[in-house]
Image (tube, rainbow, N blue to C red):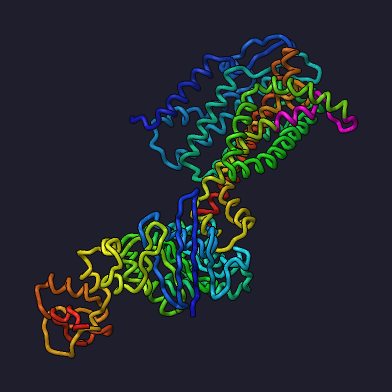
């Protein structure tokens, strides 16, 4: 047998190590105590015989490294990884129902290291299969999203409700919804002003090299201030401003300083993206536009903007993803968002509550990233053919 | 009628004089070539005509009107402009590119479409095939054809061309030079073309203007340049040792051939230059060549001695 994919072999070996060496779940009598590990093999032996079905797709995954890549086989790998991923969620859910079911049970079943590692490795298996199966980015994203449908069904059908993470969600549902809304506000209302101001500064920096030489050191320094320090630095001036201008909602803590700090961080990548986008417009194109009698505004709107857009959006993508992450830290000065749930969990040493704050941030960042990538791919695609 | 008139035009860049006291007149329907080494001021002179560069002193008149009497954008829409790197808009189709100036002038859509198709046919790019292509799907030569079509789109009074064929391979360049001559003969456009290639200037220029260090050194016809160079600089520029051959390049076989006599051998086209005929004499080791016309019919005979002009 010839080994076709070293990557897959590595993934299989790591998966085996994770499945056998790390606990898949943990069990604790209440939410604050550290849990005891439950291994995959113990899980399979408990409960109904149905649980052994989880292992059904293991064989193709084990054999895949020695397969010559072909569409049919990659489909099998895709389905196997999808099945195994969903089955692990189901297994966790049903074990949780068994051990900690019931509305008022204090016992908690949480995810162990093995669970997260296995899910990550399975995701990589999916990505490997999609390299062969899906040509463009949109198809790849679609197939990745499709692979999450079983998980969505498990979630909505309540089969995962007894897991500690979901219990935390149900206990904090209102706070969670508020946090989601606030987090989105923080991202949107920091990126938007940065977009307008940064775009203008970028255009200006493009027009005047002297201004660019002044601007970039300032922005670079801003970027290097640790976020917590910047939040802290803004408390004093903003509190003073709030006292001078009462009634505008300005205060040293809360939304105002958070939005200001996040906007400042978002500025550098936006300005860079704008400048880089404008700089890669070929000078000949600009000269031709001028020579045929376009006004400066027409050149800006009809020529420079569309040509700079893909690079500009790449800059904006980095900005938005960064803002999603940084907004979590803004909870420290009382701005709310998922950071609030996270820090609350940290101070209570309730690990699953921390996860309840971290996972949505991760997911949000991924979604923003993918959305921008799709948009940029679409713009470039429109240039290539259409 | 004088279409274009430059009077005592000067331009300084940071104290360095790029263009010095340039006087120039281009008649309507004339193809003038500005030639010179790089830094001679030829490109700067060209760009002052459509106000991409503003002169420091002197006056420039287009069709009798001072070019400063209207906003630069309005002026530029009356003047076609084609450059070496073409500068097609990469995000626009061929059709949108050619339609750029007519759109700026707010022509009706149907008229624009009609004009674009007409120009594509003129430049031998079948419209059905090329209208909706993007610039990166074209070869260098095709891009420059579209560039020329775009410059001609709004039927400008004057066409300015800044080394339009400089980036092309010799074969494509030759083809496009012939097409420019054809278009000019067809449309009677006034054209000002900048080049540093003396052969291009001799081939295209009805009036050749040689510039050096910002000044006009000599202007006149190709014959003037080859037979009566005004200075050693001109003589060197024209290529002293090749003057004879270049002179032959100015005339066609048709102008020197004799009436039909039976001569054997591979024939030469009546439209070929005498320079090509010389090459054929030497390469084929013959002293006379049968000449055929455009239809391939025998038209006459050219003898080696005919290459020498009858005492002028």
Q: Is residue B195 left or right of residue B70?
A: left
Whole-percent x and y of residue B71?
Answer: 63, 64
**Hey, which residue is sitting farthest right in the picture?**
A247
Q: Quadrant of residue B100?
A: bottom right
Work out whether residue B200 or residue B117 is closer to the camera in this orientation and state it.
B200
Q: Nearer the viewer, residue B69 or A349?
A: B69
Indicate the quadrant containing the C terminus of chain A: top left, top right, bottom left or bottom right.
bottom right
Q: Is residue A250 magenta?
A: yes
Residue A167 visible, this angle: no
Residue A119 lies, in percent from the top left, at 57, 26
Q: Residue at x 27, y 70 (%)?
A: B226
Quadrant of residue A238 within the rendered picture:
top right
Q: Quadrant of residue A203?
A: top right
Could you say where residue B273 lies in the image, as x and y percent from the top left?
Answer: 25, 75
Rendered view: B188 above or below A252: below
Residue visible at 52% across and 34% down?
A126
Looking at the image, residue B166 lies above or below residue B176:
above
In the rendered structure, which segment of residues is drawn in magenta? A245-263
Please name whichever residue, A125 or A189, is drawn nearer the observer in this view of the structure.
A189
Quadrant location of the N terminus of chain A in the rendered image: top left
The answer to whether residue A250 shows anywhere in this view is: yes
In the rendered image, residue B201 lying in the magenta stretch gets the answer no
Q: Number of labelled discs? A: 0
């Amino acid at each position: 047998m010839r080994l076709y994919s070293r990557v897959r072999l590595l993934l299989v070996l790591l998966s085996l190590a994770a499945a056998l060496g790390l606990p898949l779940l943990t069990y604790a009598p209440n939410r604050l105590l550290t849990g005891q590990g439950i291994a995959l093999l113990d899980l399979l032996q408990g409960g109904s015989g149905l649980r052994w079905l989880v292992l059904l797709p293991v064989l193709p995954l084990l054999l895949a490294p020695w397969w010559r890549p072909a569409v049919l086989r990659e489909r099998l790998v895709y389905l196997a990884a999808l099945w195994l991923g969903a089955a692990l969620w189901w297994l966790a859910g049903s074990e949780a129902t068994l051990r900690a079911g019931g509305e008022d049970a204090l016992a908690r079943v949480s995810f162990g290291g093995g669970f997260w590692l296995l899910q990550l490795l399975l995701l990589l298996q999916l990505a490997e299969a999609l390299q062969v199966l899906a040509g463009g980015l949109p198809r790849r994203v679609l197939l990745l999203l499709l692979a999450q449908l079983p998980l969505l069904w498990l979630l909505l059908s309540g089969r995962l409700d007894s897991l500690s993470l979901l219990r935390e969600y149900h206990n904090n549902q209102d706070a969670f919804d508020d946090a989601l809304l606030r987090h989105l506000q923080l991202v949107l209302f920091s990126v938007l002003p940065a977009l307008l101001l940064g775009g203008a500064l970028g255009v200006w920096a493009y027009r005047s090299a002297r201004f660019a030489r002044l601007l970039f050191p300032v922005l670079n320094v801003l970027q290097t201030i640790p976020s917590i320090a910047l939040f802290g630095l803004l408390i004093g001036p903003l509190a003073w401003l709030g006292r001078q201008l009462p009634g505008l909602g300005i205060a040293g803590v809360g939304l105002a300083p958070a939005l200001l700090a996040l906007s400042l961080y978002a500025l550098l990548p936006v300005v860079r993206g704008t400048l880089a986008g404008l700089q890669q417009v070929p000078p000949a194109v600009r000269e031709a536009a001028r020579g045929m009698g376009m006004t400066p505004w027409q050149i800006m709107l009809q020529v420079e903007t569309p040509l700079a857009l893909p690079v500009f959006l790449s800059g904006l993508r980095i900005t938005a993803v960064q803002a999603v992450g940084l907004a979590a830290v803004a909870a420290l000065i009382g701005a709310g968002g998922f950071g609030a749930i996270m820090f609350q969990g940290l101070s209570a040493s309730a690990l699953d509550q921390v996860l309840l704050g971290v996972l949505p941030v991760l997911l949000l960042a991924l979604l923003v990233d993918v959305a921008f990538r799709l948009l940029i791919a679409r713009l470039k695609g429109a240039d290539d053919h259409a | 009628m004088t279409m274009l008139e430059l009077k005592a035009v000067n331009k300084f860049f940071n104290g360095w004089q790029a263009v010095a006291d340039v006087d120039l007149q281009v008649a309507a329907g004339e193809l003038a070539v500005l030639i010179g080494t790089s830094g001679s001021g030829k490109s700067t002179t060209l760009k002052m005509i459509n106000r991409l560069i503003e002169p420091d002193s002197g006056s420039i008149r287009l069709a009798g009107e001072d070019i400063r009497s209207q906003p630069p954008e309005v002026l530029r829409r009356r003047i076609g402009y084609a450059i070496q790197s073409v500068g097609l808009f990469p995000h626009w189709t061929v059709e949108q590119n050619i339609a750029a100036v007519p759109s700026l002038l707010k022509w009706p859509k149907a008229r624009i479409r009609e004009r674009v198709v007409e120009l594509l046919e003129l430049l031998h790019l079948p419209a059905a095939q090329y209208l909706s292509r993007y610039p990166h799907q074209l070869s260098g030569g095709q891009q420059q054809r579209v560039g020329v079509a775009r410059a001609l789109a709004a039927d400008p009074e004057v066409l300015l061309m800044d080394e339009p064929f400089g980036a092309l391979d010799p074969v494509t360049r030759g083809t496009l030079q012939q097409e420019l001559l054809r278009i000019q003969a067809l449309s009677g456009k006034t054209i000002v073309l900048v080049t540093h290639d003396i052969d291009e200037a001799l081939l295209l220029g009805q009036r050749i203007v040689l510039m050096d260090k910002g000044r006009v050194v000599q202007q006149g016809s190709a014959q003037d340049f080859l037979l009566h160079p005004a200075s050693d600089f001109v003589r060197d520029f024209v290529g002293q040792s090749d003057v004879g051959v270049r002179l032959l390049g100015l005339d066609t076989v048709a102008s020197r051939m004799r009436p039909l006599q039976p001569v054997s051998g591979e024939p030469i086209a009546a439209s070929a230059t005498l320079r090509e005929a010389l090459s054929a004499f030497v390469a084929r080791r013959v002293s006379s060549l049968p000449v055929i016309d455009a239809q391939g019919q025998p038209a006459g005979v050219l003898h080696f001695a005919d290459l020498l002009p009858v005492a002028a």
